[in-house]
Image (cartoon, grey):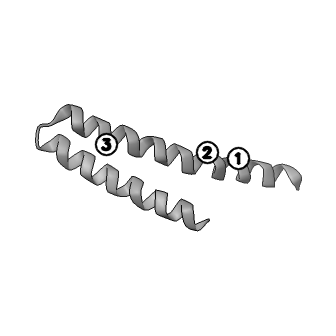
């Protein structure tokens, strides 16, 4: 995994934790914002990995 992806993965995990805590404190809109941004980061990281995995299996 690239160094940049590791940083984004760390930011996505922190965003999930912060979004969950904010939502539990009662700020629904702000918590949803953090959760949605971290979900977008997860998708940005996971989709290329799945694409590489599928292409690697098709070559064999």
Tag 2 secondary structure:
helix
Which quadrant would residue 44 be assigned to in this image? Answer: top right
Mark 3, residues whose alpha carbon is within 10 Å: few (<14), some, or many (≥20)? many
Circle nearer the N terminus (1, 3): 3
**Tags 1 and 2 in contact by the CB under 8 Å rule?**
yes
Q: Earlier in the sequence, mark 3 or mark 2?
A: 3
Q: Mark 2 and mark 3 in contact (Cβ < 8 Å)? A: no
Q: Nearer the viewer, residue 29 or 54?
A: 29
The residue identified by callout 1 is 51
Residue 17 left/right relative to 27: right
Mark 1 is surrounded, within 10 Å at the Cα level, by few (under 14), some (14 to 19) or many (20 or more) other residues, namely few
Element type where label 3 sits in the image: helix
In this figure, which residue is indicated by the disc labeled 3? 34
Q: Alpha carbon of mark 1 to alpha carbon of mark 3: how far?
A: 26 Å
The residue closer to the viewer here, 7 or 21, is 7
**Residue, far top:** 29
Q: Residue at x 26, y 46 (%)?
A: 19
Q: Is residue 1 above or below residue 8?
A: below
Camera-nearest label, 3 or 2: 3
Neighbours of disc 2 within 10 Å: few (<14), some (14-19), many (20+)? few
Q: Position of residue 18 (x, y in %)?
A: 25, 51
* 25 relative position to 37: left or right: left
Q: Nearer the viewer, mark 1 or mark 3?
A: 3
Q: In the rendering, at what x and y percent does residue 39 appear?
A: 43, 42
Which residue appears farthest toward the front when viewing the image?
4
Residue 3: horizontal and vertical position, in percent? 57, 68
- Which residue is the site of mark 2? 47
């Amino acid at each position: 995994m690239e160094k940049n992806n590791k940083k984004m993965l760390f930011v996505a995990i922190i965003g999930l934790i912060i979004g969950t805590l904010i939502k539990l404190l009662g700020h629904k809109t702000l918590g949803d914002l953090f959760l949605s941004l971290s979900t977008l980061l997860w998708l940005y990281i996971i989709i290329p990995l799945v694409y590489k995995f599928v292409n690697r299996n098709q070559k064999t």
